[in-house]
Amino acid sequence: MRLVLLGPPGAGKGTQSVLLAASLDVPHISTGDLFRGHVERGTALGEQVRAIMTTGGLVPTALTVAVVEERLSHGDAADGFLLDGFPRSTVQAEALDRILASRAQELSAAVLLDLPDDEVVRRIAGRRVCGRDPSHTFHQDTAPPLRAGECDYCGGALHRRTDDEPATVLRRQELYRSETAPLVDYYLRAGLLRRVDALGPVAEVGNRVQRALAASRR
Ligand code: ADP
Ligand code: AMP
C-alpha cells in the first residue's frame, strides 16, 4: 500500500506509523525524521534546515520534494510506503502525484488522524523522543518509558524536541491550519481520504486505522 498520514503536529502520526508500517511491511518515511537525521549528522542539507526547524517553519518545497523523491527511489519503497509529515501543502501533494504518476503508481489512501486542539496540546507538551532514534517516541503521562529518561528500545537518552516549545508549537499549528489542512479537501475530492478519530489509547486508534484501510487494499 502507498499511504499518506495526515494530522496536526502531535496527533500521533509517528506513533501510528511505526505500528502500521510493521503490520503492512512497508517503510515508514517521516520527512521530519529525515531532516532531523541530516541536522544531527551536520550535512549541508542539515545546516540549511536547522534554523527553519527550530523555529517551526516549513522547509522549502523544492528541498523537501527532492528528499522524498530520493527516498522513494530506494528498493524498499518499490511496493509500498507510509509517508508521515509529507505532503504538508497542496503544492507538495501535487508533486507527490507527479512522482507517483511517473512510476505508473497511485496512492492507496490518505489517513487523517482527527484530534481536538486541547488533546493535541497535551500530547505535544508531554512528548519525549529518543536521542538515538527519533522514531522512538514516549509521552510522560500517556506512554512513559519503563525507566525515567531512558528509551525502552535502545537505552538512548530521552529529551524534549526543540520545536516542541510552546511558541514554536503555536507556529507549527498555524502552518498546519493554513498550509496542510487544505489537503483534507484535496484527498477527499480524490476519493482517498480516510478520517480516523485519534482520541483514545494507541492500540485502539491503530485498530481504527486498520478498519479505515480495509477498503483500500491495493
Ligand atoms: P506526530 O507524529 O503526529 O507529531 P507523535 O506520534 O509524536 O505525533 O505523538 C505525539 C505524542 O503523543 C507522543 O508523546 C506520543 O507518545 C503521544 N501519543 C501518541 N498517540 C497517543 C494516544 N493514542 N494516546 C495518548 N498519547 C499518544
Ligand atoms: P515533524 O517531525 O513532521 O513534526 O516535522 C518537523 C519539522 O520538519 C517541521 O516543523 C518542518 O520544519 C520540517 N518538515 C517536515 N516535513 C516537512 C514538509 N513536508 N515540508 C516542509 N517542512 C517539513
Image (cartoon, helix red, strand yellow):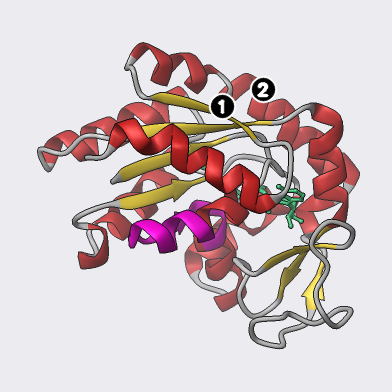
In front of the other: 10 or 94 = 10
Q: Where is residue 3 in the image (x, y as percent from the top left)?
A: 37, 42
Question: To which residue does mark 1 refer?
Answer: 180
- Examine the image and state in which quarter residue 57 appears: top right
Residue 28 appears in the figure:
no
In front of the other: 164 or 58 = 164
Residue 13 appears in the figure:
yes
Of helix, strand and loop, which one carries label 1?
helix
Q: Are marks 1 and 2 in contact (CB under 8 Å)?
A: yes
- For residue 157, side relative to residue 44 (left or right): right
Which residue sits at x=51%, y=59%?
A: 19
- Examine the image and state in which quarter residue 218 appears: top left
Amino acid, disc 2: Arg
- For residue 23, side relative to residue 177 (left or right): left
Of helix, strand and loop, which one carries label 2?
helix
Which residue sits at x=36%, y=24%?
A: 192
Dominant secondary structure (helix, strand or loop) of the stretch shown in magenta: helix
Q: Position of residue 36 (x, y in %)?
A: 59, 64
Amino acid, disc 1: Thr
Q: Where is residue 75 in the image (x, y as percent from the top left)?
A: 20, 66
The residue stretch that appears in magenta? 18-33
User: Does residue 99 belong to the magenta stretch?
Assistant: no
Which residue sits at x=68%, y=41%?
A: 11
Q: Residues within 10 Å of mark 2 (few under 14, many from 20)?
A: few
- For residue 129, side relative to residue 119 (left or right): left
Question: To which residue does mark 2 refer?
Answer: 177
